[in-house]
Image (spheres, rainbow, N blue to C red):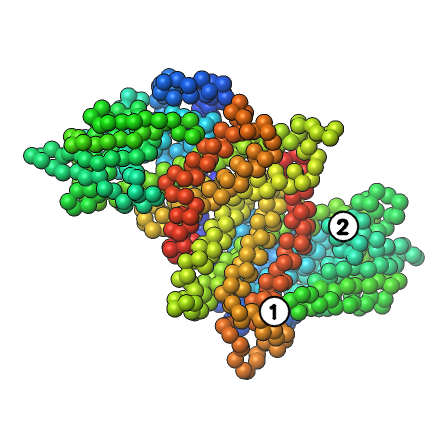
């Protein structure tokens, strides 16, 4: 057992930490949010140059060949910086789907472009009726004369507004398949999300598609989504750590009744309870990272869900307490804590809420 | 980063598991699993089996029976011992007075006490708290006065756990009444048979008698029974309290209890299904398991950090383990109450439960469910209450 990072991992951590510290100040981020895309192409190019876009991809496609630990380091830094670039959509979801399920040609072609920062992907999966059931897919795919066509509607497609290509899940005659679609051939309605990210509602009307898998796509979807949840857990921990640190700093500087409010034991203890919640969440984010590659779907699923439950609960508690202990200032858009709170609140409902994950843990054999 | 145990660590764990599950009599482990307490004889029997195999005091200095294990090995040892429902080597001997004597005692004291302490030939109890000195331990008032080379002790100690079985008591006593309160305390070893000591058992809300008041009335103790230097007792007490950094979470005990909860819930019918299949119960069980898993990971992270810490120097982050570990211990007893349901009610003194011939009333372990729940309220109070732990974290970690 060893919690230390190896040299390569430390290098990645240093470079992503520096990128976020130097380029992701609150004002810089605010300017980016108001731009047309809502994120920065220049930043994206930098991420490509630093090797962040290909961190988990094979060296043959220009990647770094890293694993879940490398991804976790990036996620945590992005959480601290509230990074809004389409990393989750393109790298964590899109590229990983192709990495696990794609043909050799798709892998080499698409993933090389992703690593270079030349291709934006999104995962068009969620549908209006599905809630958190990954198997609820009503969009269909049919083959005519050797060509596949997709029909249906996808919802809440993260960064689907800017993606060049979409990885779409669709029901075929034999199961759930995965297809790649040129995003320009769909109808898209893009919008801003509560946390400053972007997403889209996407319509498919007999859209020509390239098959990735024509059946058995569900297992791959579960695998990729579980790894994506591990990413979200680490990202959330980065945000929670910032909220906690900011709260402790504030308690030490804010004066009322003639003294810094951090002298009040009632507030100290609440800051400590935030710390306990943070440590528990950090532990489970690590656990999720450790289990993200587990091939046994049941074992992996229970572990990932357990992590999401803990992270959701800790995140909600820390976020609400951060706002309360800062007081009115944290209610304003010009103060950073509220933005972390909003991001955390969205993560809570992304790929399964607390109840749905708790039910998954409860249905599985004991974690212990 | 590699979060799995090495093959060597796994082999180490398997070997311990085998020893704990085959060498410690099943009748003793079964008793613990059912929520009963070991008798004095069973505690001694267990510790002597462990000690004969070098497993009673592995964290002590090698010279006095320690094993020089890594923090990970110590963790695995604690976890396996607790998970196997083996009575823990008596904490007053092994985690408290033994390490203090080994670190600060004279050579003569080490030779006289340590081997007997490890083998539980002498049963030690703790004379720290007083009626007026609980969380504010340093305000203790029991006095020790040097008269003709001997200590004369007067005062009263409280919450002395298992004092009724003890041969010896280690006492914190005030030896300088005018110094700052932390700087006038000494650490003295006292034979319980000394004239002037009286013990009053206190029944706790679970119906058991686990704690005592100990009165000292002109108790004369040889001068040589002072440990270390006079008026330095507070330092030794802090060393003692910081000694058990990670075992305090009692994760193995909570794991064993949750396993028992599952076993019993699988036998209890509720509304035509097994209680274990009742979704609401199942989710509450899952919630506790998730938090326990998280705490286990938290503990492992701290164990890993411990490599860089000096021995006897408490890691303030271990207060996180105490807070969460005690809450989860309590949560497991709540789940057990839920499983037993209405059969929590019938009360039998623990002495009657042992070796009784007639069947119990209600589910297995029904008679211990409520007493265990009542008794476990103590874990967030003792060893530095959870509020004191929050003070420690606020000061030492958050810098308030």
Q: Is residue B51 above or below residue A71?
A: below
Image coords of residue A335 (percent x, y): 54, 25
Q: If the image is split into quadrants, where does the C terminus of chain B sit? A: top right
Q: Nearer the viewer, residue B302 or B266?
A: B266
> Which residue was labeled with disc 2?
B137
Q: Is residue A3 above or below residue B198?
A: above
Q: Quadrant of residue A46?
A: top left
Label 2 residue SS: helix
Looking at this rendering, what residue extends furthest in the right direction?
B148
Marked residue chain, label 1? B
Q: Residue at x 52, y 48 (%)?
A: B295
User: In the image, B345: left or right of A135?
Assistant: right
Q: Is residue B4 above or below residue B281?
A: above
Q: How many other residues sit within 10 Å of disc 2, few (<14), some (14-19) or many (≥20)?
A: some
Q: If the image is split into quadrants, where does the N terminus of chain B sit? A: top left
> Which residue was labeled with disc 1?
B38
Q: Is residue A94 visible?
A: no
Q: How many other residues sit within 10 Å of disc 1, few (<14), some (14-19) or many (≥20)?
A: some
């Amino acid at each position: 057992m060893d919690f230390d990072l190896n040299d390569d991992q430390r290098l990645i951590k240093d470079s992503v930490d520096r990128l976020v510290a130097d380029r992701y100040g609150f004002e810089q981020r605010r300017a980016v949010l108001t731009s047309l895309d809502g994120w920065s192409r220049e930043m994206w190019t930098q991420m490509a140059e630093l090797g962040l876009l290909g961190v988990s991809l094979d060296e043959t496609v220009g990647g770094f060949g890293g694993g879940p630990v490398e991804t976790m380091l990036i996620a945590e830094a992005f959480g601290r910086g509230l990074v809004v670039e389409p990393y989750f959509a393109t790298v964590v979801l899109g590229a990983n789907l192709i990495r696990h399920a794609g043909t050799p040609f798709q892998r080499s072609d698409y993933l090389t472009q992703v690593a270079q920062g030349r291709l934006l992907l999104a995962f068009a999966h969620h549908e209006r009726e599905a809630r958190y059931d990954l198997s609820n897919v009503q969009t269909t795919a049919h083959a005519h004369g050797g060509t596949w066509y997709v029909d249906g509607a996808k919802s809440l497609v993260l960064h689907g507004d800017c993606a060049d290509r979409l990885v779409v899940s669709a029901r075929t005659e034999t199961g759930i398949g995965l297809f790649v679609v040129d995003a320009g051939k769909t109808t898209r309605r893009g919008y801003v999300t509560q946390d400053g990210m972007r997403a889209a509602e996407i319509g498919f009307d007999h859209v020509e598609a390239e098959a990735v898998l024509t059946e058995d796509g569900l297992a791959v979807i579960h695998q990729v989504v579980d790894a994506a949840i591990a990413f979200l857990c680490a990202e959330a921990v980065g945000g929670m750590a910032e909220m906690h640190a900011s709260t402790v700093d504030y308690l030490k500087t804010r004066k009322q009744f003639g003294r810094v409010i951090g002298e009040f034991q009632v507030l100290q203890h609440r800051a400590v309870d935030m710390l306990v919640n943070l440590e528990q969440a950090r532990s489970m984010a690590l656990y999720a990272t450790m289990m993200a590659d587990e091939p046994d779907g049941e074992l992996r699923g229970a572990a990932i869900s357990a992590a999401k439950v803990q992270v959701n609960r800790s995140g909600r508690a820390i976020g609400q307490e951060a706002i309360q202990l800062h007081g009115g200032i944290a209610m304003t858009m010009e103060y950073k804590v509220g933005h972390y709170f909003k991001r955390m609140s969205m993560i809570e409902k992304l790929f399964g809420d607390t109840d749905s994950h708790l039910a998954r843990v409860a249905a599985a054999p004991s974690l212990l | 980063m590699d979060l799995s145990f090495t093959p060597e660590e796994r082999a180490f764990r398997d070997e311990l598991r085998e020893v704990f599950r085959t060498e410690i009599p099943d009748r003793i482990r079964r008793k613990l699993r059912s929520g009963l307490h070991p008798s004095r004889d069973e505690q001694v029997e267990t510790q002597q089996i462990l000690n004969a195999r070098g497993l009673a005091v592995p964290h002590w200095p090698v010279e006095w029976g320690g094993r020089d294990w890594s923090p990970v090995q110590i963790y695995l040892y604690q976890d396996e011992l607790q998970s196997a429902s083996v009575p823990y080597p008596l904490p007053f001997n092994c985690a408290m007075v033994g390490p203090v004597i080994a670190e600060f005692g004279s050579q003569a004291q080490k030779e006289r006490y340590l081997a007997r302490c490890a083998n539980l030939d002498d049963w030690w109890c703790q004379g720290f708290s007083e009626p007026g000195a609980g969380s504010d331990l340093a305000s203790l008032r029991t006095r020790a006065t040097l008269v003709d080379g001997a200590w004369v002790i007067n005062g009263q100690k409280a919450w002395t756990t298992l004092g009724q079985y003890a041969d010896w008591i280690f006492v914190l006593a005030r030896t300088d009444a005018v110094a700052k309160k932390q700087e006038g305390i000494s650490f003295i070893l006292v034979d319980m048979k000394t004239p002037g000591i009286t013990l009053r058992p206190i029944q706790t809300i679970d119906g058991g008698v686990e704690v005592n008041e100990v009165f000292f009335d002109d108790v004369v103790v040889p001068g040589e029974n002072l440990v270390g230097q006079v008026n330095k007792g507070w330092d030794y007490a802090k060393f003692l309290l910081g000694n058990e950094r990670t075992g305090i979470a009692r994760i193995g005990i909570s794991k064993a209890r949750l396993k028992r909860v599952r076993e019993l819930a699988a036998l209890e019918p509720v509304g035509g299904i097994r209680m274990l299949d009742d979704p609401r119960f199942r989710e509450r069980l899952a919630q506790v398991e998730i938090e326990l898993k998280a705490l286990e990971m938290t503990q492992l992270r701290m164990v890993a950090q411990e490599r860089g810490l000096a021995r006897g120097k408490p890691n303030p982050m271990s207060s996180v383990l105490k807070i969460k570990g005690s809450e989860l211990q309590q949560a497991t007893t709540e789940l057990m109450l839920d499983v037993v349901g209405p059969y929590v009610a019938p009360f039998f003194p623990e002495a009657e439960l042992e070796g009784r011939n007639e069947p119990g009333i209600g589910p297995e372990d029904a008679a211990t469910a409520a007493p265990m729940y009542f008794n476990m309220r103590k874990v967030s109070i003792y060893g530095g209450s959870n509020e004191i732990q929050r003070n420690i974290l606020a000061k030492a970690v958050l810098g308030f």
